[in-house]
Image: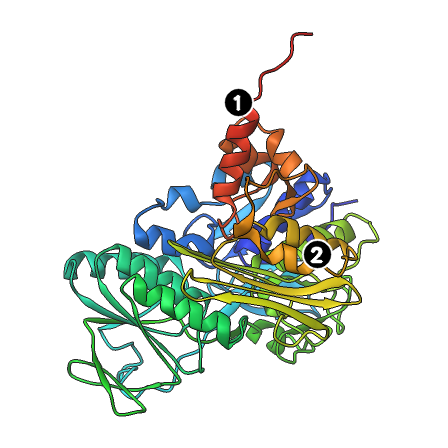
């Protein structure tokens, strides 16, 4: 009897995590990964660090092609899928090759949506020469080359004030460019933060040299830059698009699978239309919700690997953690702090550049937003994940992080890496940063925990070992 044939469409962070989990569980089937990019899978969140110059392309590679080969996984780079034939049980590549499957995983991620800016796209369908997308390594490399050509002092406008927009703005500013952000919403990070937190972020960015225009939309490319809907014109040597994205569902739709905003899946991450087809990451919709963050995608990967190896794990979709990875900016969001029901405990200090918001329901943290000092994010995340009931004074004490006279010593069971769900104890047990990354995957998601991981490793190394 031949082994089960599992085909994964997509070579992003969710797909790689699934393969890692399957390898750890000794999955007995044959795994084929069809990745449409020509590069070995990489950490998309850290592309801004490559643009900034603090990380090399090699440093953000998740797993080398040799790693896949050594574990018997057939990784095919540059393999673009044209169609899924559920009746025949195969997928067709653009070169005409067909790859058969017994089970299929769609991990196609998300695709950018172009804002309605006149002159953005030329008659031949290409982008205006001053305009750059920023979704892939190829996009990053093209932008990097253009920044090097223009040199310090060039002017850049970033369209979009979400997580990606802020990361790109800081990366370009660190390269010496004059940067401006245009955001159509009334404040930055409007999908994650309320107005007070967005205002603190805007103040921080202006302090760092980046001008911010909120409540304004770019409407037209001009000879010298970009015109806004308020009539103001920004001069720009380059324009970077970071606003808007949607689940990539074209393959699922053409295959006749149920799609709303994303591929609709159940708690075993199976398509509700075909039990042989599973979905993972940004392209799926579970209980009416889609997600664009690493932690839930990696959580899904663990659940799906368990399901594919005969387990009974189920995904409940309750855990949502977002981190901003940008030099001199710190943001963490747990759940939906603007809409979650409950009592709000909030503290804002725009002068110090900090904003903290906890939403408490029945004594339990159901959502949180932290801007600025993230010294308590590990503890708050632990309380959030565990549903710990707090006393009446504890929420306020949690928000007074900067008032602590001594550094907080994290217990071993406190989560430090939200993306991979790694505790302080697991990190302390590692001999080096490299071994920590390899064994726990900490720091390989958003990268926001790297400082805390390095401190934990340094503290552990400084503790003398008793003679036995």
**327 w.r.t. 150: above or below:** above
Residue 138 in the figure: left or right of residue 79: left
Image x and y of residue 2, in percent: 75, 45
Dot 1: element: helix
| Residue beneath the point at 46% across and 72% down | 198
| Residue beneath the point at 60% across and 77% down | 254
Image x and y of residue 346, in percent: 59, 68
Mark carried by residue 394? 2
Q: Which one is earlier in the sequence, the residue at label 1 or at label 2?
A: 2
List the residue tagged with mark 1: 462
Q: Quadrant of residue 56?
A: top left
Residue 312 in the figure: left or right of residue 95: right
**58 w.r.t. 81: above or below:** above
Determine crowd level at label 2: few under 14, some 14-19, many 20+ residues with C-alpha closer than 10 A.
few
Mark 1–mark 2 CB contact (< 8 Å): no
Mark carried by residue 370? none
Determine crowd level at label 1: few under 14, some 14-19, many 20+ residues with C-alpha closer than 10 A.
few
Image x and y of residue 28, in percent: 73, 42
Dot 2: element: helix
| Residue beneath the point at 22% across and 73% down | 129
Front-most of residues 123 and 195: 195
């Amino acid at each position: 009897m031949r082994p089960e044939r599992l085909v994964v469409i997509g070579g992003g962070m969710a797909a790689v995590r699934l393969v890692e989990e399957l390898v750890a569980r000794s999955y007995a089937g044959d795994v084929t990964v069809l990745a449409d990019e020509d590069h070995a899978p990489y950490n998309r969140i850290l592309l801004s660090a490559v643009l900034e110059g603090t990380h090399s392309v090699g440093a953000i590679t998740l797993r080398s092609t040799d790693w896949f080969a050594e574990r018997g996984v057939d990784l095919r780079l540059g393999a673009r899928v044209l169609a899924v034939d559920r009746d025949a049980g195969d997928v067709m590549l653009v070169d005409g090759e067909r790859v058969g499957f017994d089970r299929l995983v769609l991990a196609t991620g998300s695709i950018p949506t172009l804002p309605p800016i006149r002159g953005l796209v030329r008659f031949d369908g290409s982008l205006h020469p001053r305009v750059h997308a920023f979704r892939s390594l190829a996009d990053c490399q093209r932008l990097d080359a253009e920044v090097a050509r223009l040199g310090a002092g060039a002017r850049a406008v970033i369209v979009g004030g979400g997580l990606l927009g802020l990361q790109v703005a800081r990366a370009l500013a660190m390269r010496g460019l004059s940067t401006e952000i245009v955001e159509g919403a009334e404040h930055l990070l409007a999908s994650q933060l309320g107005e007070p937190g967005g205002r603190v972020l805007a103040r921080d960015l202006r302090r760092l040299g980046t001008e911010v225009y909120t409540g304004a939309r770019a409407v037209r490319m001009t000879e010298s830059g970009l015109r806004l809907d308020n009539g103001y014109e920004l001069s720009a040597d380059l324009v970077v698009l970071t606003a808007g994205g949607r689940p990539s569902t074209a393959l699922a739709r053409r295959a006749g699978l149920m799609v709303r905003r994303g591929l609709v899946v159940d708690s075993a991450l199976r398509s509700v239309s075909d039990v042989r087809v599973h979905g993972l990451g940004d392209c799926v919709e579970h209980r009416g919700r889609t997600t664009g963050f690493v932690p839930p995608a990696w959580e899904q990967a663990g659940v799906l690997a368990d399901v594919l190896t005969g387990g009974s794990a189920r995904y409940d979709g309750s855990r949502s953690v977002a981190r901003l990875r940008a030099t001199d900016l710190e943001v963490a969001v747990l759940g939906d702090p603007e809409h979650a029901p409950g009592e709000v405990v909030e503290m804002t200090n725009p002068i110090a550049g900090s904003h903290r918001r906890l939403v408490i329901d029945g004594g339990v943290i159901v959502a949180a937003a932290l801007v600025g000092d993230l010294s308590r994010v590990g503890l708050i995340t632990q309380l959030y994940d565990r549903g710990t009931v707090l006393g009446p004074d504890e929420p306020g004490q949690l928000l007074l992080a900067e008032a602590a006279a001594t550094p907080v010593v994290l217990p071993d069971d406190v989560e430090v890496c939200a993306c991979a769900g790694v505790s302080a104890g697991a990190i302390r047990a590692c001999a080096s940063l490299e071994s920590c990354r390899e064994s726990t995957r900490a720091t390989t998601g958003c990268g926001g925990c790297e400082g805390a991981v390095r401190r934990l490793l340094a503290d552990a190394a400084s503790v003398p070992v008793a003679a036995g």
